[in-house]
Amino acid sequence: MASFPSTFLWGSSTNAQQFEGGRNEGGVGTSIADVRVIPGYEDADFSGFKIAADHYHHLEEDLDLYAEMGFTTYRFSIAWTRIPATSRPSLSTSRVA
């Protein structure tokens, strides 16, 4: 069986909608997921999408788990609603976990 070269980087990636959490914290704005209505599902409970895996509150613990698995790289996305929509960009670290 072929093996990976010693320079191969093992890692993980996550998507903000599925992983981020911290919906009402850090000055985050309103997203389409917060106000959408899906025809036929008007009474459905989509609150779980706002919590997701709650990486916002579990960042250190999640990174420790990645290290335990031997990961050396991590690619993640953040919700655009964490970046203030102003004519003068300023990125607050309290908005980006």
Image (cartoon, rainbow, N blue to C red):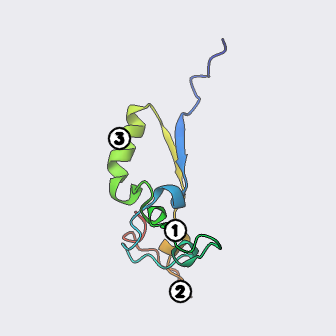
First along the sequence among labels 3 and 2? 3
The quadrant of the image that shows the N terminus is top right
Q: Amino acid at mark 2?
A: Thr
The quadrant of the image that shows the C terminus is bottom left
Q: Amino acid at mark 1?
A: Ala
Q: Which residue is mark 3?
A: 64
Q: Secondary structure at mark 3?
A: helix
Residue 7 located left or right of residue 94: right
Q: Amino acid at mark 3?
A: Asp
Q: Measure the C-alpha gap from mark 2 to mark 1.
A: 34 Å
The answer to the question of whether label 3 and label 2 lie on touching residues, with beta carbons closer than 8 A, is no
Q: Residues within 10 Å of mark 3 (few under 14, many from 20)?
A: few
Residue 82 higher or lower than 13, as above or below: below
Q: Which residue is mark 1?
A: 44
Rendering coords of residue 61 (x, y %): 32, 46
Q: What residue sits 53% from the left and 86% below the top?
A: 86
Q: Secondary structure at mark 2?
A: loop
Residue 27 located left or right of residue 12: left
- Total numbered labels placed on residues in the image: 3
Residue 10 circle label: none
Residue 96 higher or lower than 87, as above or below: above
The answer to the question of whether label 3 and label 1 lie on touching residues, with beta carbons closer than 8 A, is no
First along the sequence among labels 3 and 1? 1
First along the sequence among labels 2 and 1? 1
Rendering coords of residue 24 (x, y %): 38, 74
Q: Residues within 10 Å of mark 1 (few under 14, many from 20)?
A: few
Residue 51 higher or lower than 58, as above or below: below
Instruction: Name the front one of labels 3 and 2.
Output: 3
Q: Which residue is mark 2?
A: 86
Q: What residue sits 48% from the left and 72% below the top?
A: 82
* Residue nearest the viewer, comparing 19 with 83: 19
Q: Measure the C-alpha gap from mark 3 to mark 1.
A: 35 Å
